[in-house]
Image (tube, rainbow, N blue to C red):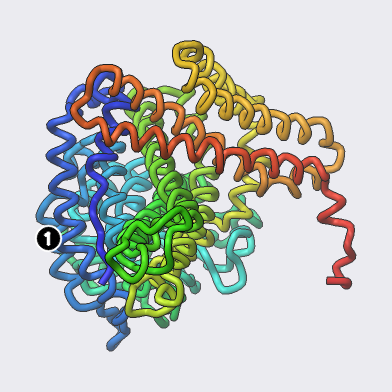
Amino acid sequence: MPIYNAPTKDTQFILHDVLKVSQSDIPGYDELESEFTGAVLEEAGKLATNVLHPLNVVGDTEGCRLENGVVRTPTGFKEAFEEVKAGGWTGLDMPEEYGGQNMPYVMGTAVGEMFSASNSAFTMYQGLTHGAASAILAHGTEEQKNTYLPKMVSCDWTGTMNLTEPHCGTDLGLMRTKAEPQADGSYKITGQKIFISSGDHDMADNIIHLVLAKIVGGPEGIKGVSLFIVPKYMVNEDGSLGDRNPATVGKIEEKMGIHGNSTCVMNYDGATGFLIGDEHKGMRAMFTMMNEARLGVGMQGLCQADAAYQNAVEYAKDRLQGRDVTGAKNPEGPADPLIVHPDIRRNLMDQKSFSEGARAFILWGASLIDAAHRKGDKDADGLISLLTPVIKGFLTDEGYDMTVQAQQVYGGHGYIEEWGMSQYTRDARIAMIYEGANGVQALDLVGRKLAADGGKHVMAFFELVKSYIKDNGGQDEAFDRDFLEPLKAASKDLQAAGMYFMQNATNPNNALSGSYDFMHMFGHVCLGLMWAQMGKASLDALAAGTEDKEFYETKLITGRFYMARRLPATGMHLARIQSGGDTVMTLDAASF
């Protein structure tokens, strides 16, 4: 069976050496001392490794089953869910007034990585609940918050998000689910939703569905969409559960991966729903949940990549195959271990440098969310809004690729189910699709986010990179050469791509045809910035005389690899963008 070890040490390094969280002026960060965060992460890691990870293969092989209208989760899931709940992990970063622990979002993210990497399908149940609770917290009435949040924060009740319908995915203006106003202020919700993750299961007493629907007589298209709370069981005034709402499971989808999560077709047959937020402003409320979910999905790309990498490294060290071209490294044995071969090293270094860079990127993004929510920092809010499609799109694309590379280390065994590597690849694949397919993320980045607030936020990002290079240059010749110069070159490529879009705006296809490349360019520059910061932190630790010299030297070697071997991809992406839209759009549709 595959292994999993929580990256406690690396996470601590990012939190304290790189982000320096306890020195931040973000409210609550002064409590994030190393001893405290270390204790939290240590306990989360034990739960992930000892409880959740052993169930990962169980969820994959058993899947969920629909019995008499109720979804049954895989063996051991319910008991594990109770253990997660009992530890207070589901409300780690939720408000105390609703039963949460009010820790910063960055801590919820760090713990969430461990849980998701150990068992992604399982962790989705509480992850989606967190998103639904966040939407109610941001847009619900006081009565709605008091009714639903305490039970959702504890995960006694779980939550879902219902957007997609059989005939419409991204284009939600085409939805047909309708909401009919009732005399008591409620609505009757009628329609069918598909691909509903955690749509039904046997681990919670109630399930609170957030459903997008159109109020009868409202505006056409996306302007007529509203958001509704539709509970599986009605909630009485005293908080007890009442009648069963006609919100039922049509079937469980048969999927490529994440078999342990119940992805359902949901039928709403005049189900009672309650408006959340304003009429016809459902997308505003739903985006609170979707943006959080997109960051979580981006993290899933990292999680599957890192879990697969951990196993690939162990295999490469143990599997004997061929001889080192420079001389036998295992002369007493019949062959040398795989890890001596340059192409295996390249493969593993690709994975290692991605995972560690992506972890830093995710935690930096989480700190921006904390700055926006806890400090009211509008610039941080604008920057994380810009980076959200990059986090989601780039990290899931690259994360999936890394699981494939991990499979490749195993050779034929990577294709055989008993070794467990296939599951990482299958589970990672959906992350490129749900919460907005990655092509849509790229269009959002180029079509909307770049121009937001007059381009203020992308210019702020470029200034951030420029200032970092200026402030940290000239102190160490090797650092300048190995980290800052590659980062500067990559940032210039990204700026050149943005300039190309501006100069060729008369034909919008020029920008949209290059949007996917731009998203990947942006992702590489972000990881380049993370690696520059991690490289500088490592040099500082070594100069200070750290007792863990090997850790920091390894970090520098890994960073140099990324800057030399991965970051130059920005040049390729720039060349593609500058080839223009005609190369993509000229061929007549009938000729495909």
Q: Residue at x 58, y 54 (%)?
A: 438
Name the quadrant of the N terminus: bottom left
Residue 56: quadrant of the picture:
bottom left
From the viewer's perspective, tell me whether residue 329 is left or right of residue 573: left
Q: Residue at x 33, y 71 (%)?
A: 334
Q: Residue at x 12, y 60 (%)?
A: 83
Residue 356: quadrant of the picture:
top left
Q: Which residue is drawn at 58% across and 24% down?
A: 485
Residue type for callout 1: Glu
Above or below 83: residue 362:
above
Query: Depth check: 399 or 192 in front?
Result: 399
Q: Is residue 45 visible?
A: yes
The residue that label 1 is drawn on is 83
Q: Give x and y (percent) for residue 551.
A: 28, 36
Query: Depth check: 426 or 211 in front?
Result: 426
From the viewer's perspective, tell me whether residue 315 is left or right of residue 101: right
Name the quadrant of the C terminus: bottom right
Q: Give x and y (percent) for residue 210.
A: 39, 58
Query: Depth check: 291 or 421 in front?
Result: 421
Above or below 201: residue 4:
above
Q: Is residue 230 visible?
A: no
Label 1 crowd (10 A; few <14 / some 14-19 / many >=20): some
| Callout 1 secondary element | helix
Q: Give x and y (percent) for residue 191.
A: 50, 72
Query: Depth check: 90 or 553 in front?
Result: 553
From the viewer's perspective, tell me whether residue 262 is left or right of residue 471: left
